[in-house]
Amino acid sequence: MAIGVTVLNQVLMMFALMLVGYILFKKELLNESGTAQLSTILLQVCTPAIIINSFNIEFSFDILSDLGIAFGLAFVSMFLGLAIGKILFGKTHRIEQFAIAFSNVGFFGIPLVTGLLGIEYVTYLSAFILAFNLLTWTIGLYMITNDKSVINLSYFLKTPAFIGMALGFLLFISPIKLSGFIQQSIASIGSMNTPIAMLVLGTYLAKSKLIDIFKNKHVYSIALLRLIVVPLIVLAVLSFLPMIRPEVRLVILIASSAPSATILAIFSQKYGHDYTYGAQIISFTNIMCLISIPIIITFAYSLWI
């Protein structure tokens, strides 16, 4: 029961920060331009910083093995979502398939893993983020556009998360570790990830009329699949893999239980799909995960730890 309270407190703290972002946007103290700038700072500075800092540890073959396992399990999780979306929605409902398969692993996963398990476990989450970026910029982009010509792996290689992962991994295998003011500076920048991410997500909620979100019947089925069905299947798969450390399994489950990825709205807007619908899915799943995540993680914790 204690873990349930801990998870709920962490999620409530994150939603309190989202509420601040919501109010700031509604009061016009934060506008579209400001939100875009915060997103840039988050994605290009804070996320790479927290990933690099999480790799600032002594090299271990056990950790290296767990990283490889986390990377592989990330693909399993997302391909399960892709399969479920394709079976239930067919080829035409591309936004729905994307929303079910890809979670908000960066904006939501990093704060939750950091708060519940500690920054050292962001190392394993970064493997999930790497797989997420690889799939969203290839299969995910094709799903939204139905055009193979837009796929360009150079986009993936230029993502700040990939660069942060590459630099972090080099640091991990190197005998030289960050220390002093350099390490403290990177750690301080990384610590801004949670508040900035939640402020940005709060502005997403503010951009949509909440009454319209709850009136849209389609978002309920998508939320059920993204927040309950996919995490429970992932939980079942992980339960049959007792050789994997419980903490690593929890990292994968947290990433798999997060709301729909915000990049869905970005792709929808850029490639001529219904941006409003995509934003509604993101907003609704962010609201409903307040209920789903504590239940899923508490259940998993009782089974594994």
Image (spheres, rainbow, N blue to C red):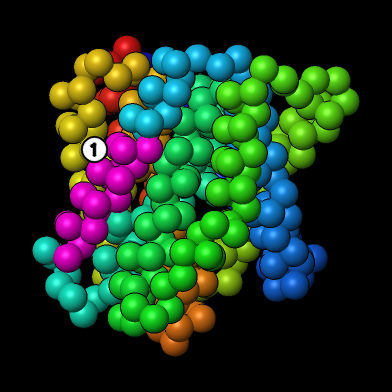
Residue, x 51% and y 25% (percent of image)?
121
Q: Is residue 137 left or right of residue 144?
A: right
Q: Nearer the viewer, residue 30 or 132?
A: 132
Residue 74 lies within the magenta run: yes
Q: Position of residue 56 (x, y in %)?
A: 65, 24
Q: Position of residue 180 (x, y in %)?
A: 85, 20
Q: Position of residue 64 (x, y in %)?
A: 45, 23
Residue, x 61% and y 32% (percent of image)?
170
Q: Give the residues in magenta.
A: 71-86
| Outermost residue to the right | 181
Query: What type of secondary structure mainly makes up the magenta span?
Result: helix
Residue 195 seen in render: no
Q: Quadrant of residue 142?
A: bottom left
Q: Is residue 35 left or right of residue 139?
A: right
Residue 129 lies within the magenta run: no
**Amino acid type, callout 1:** Val
Position above or below: 145 against 284:
below
Q: Position of residue 49 (x, y in %)?
A: 69, 39
Quadrant containing the C terminus in the rendered view: top left
Tag 1 residue: 234
Q: Residues within 10 Å of mark 1 (few under 14, many from 20)?
A: many
Residue 133 seen in render: yes
Residue, x 41% and y 73% (percent of image)?
151
| Outermost residue to the front | 174
Q: Quadrant of residue 299?
A: top left
Residue, x 17% and y 57% (percent of image)?
84
Q: Quadrant of residue 204?
A: bottom right
Is label 1 in a helix, a strand or a loop?
Answer: helix
Q: Is residue 119 left or right of residue 291?
A: right
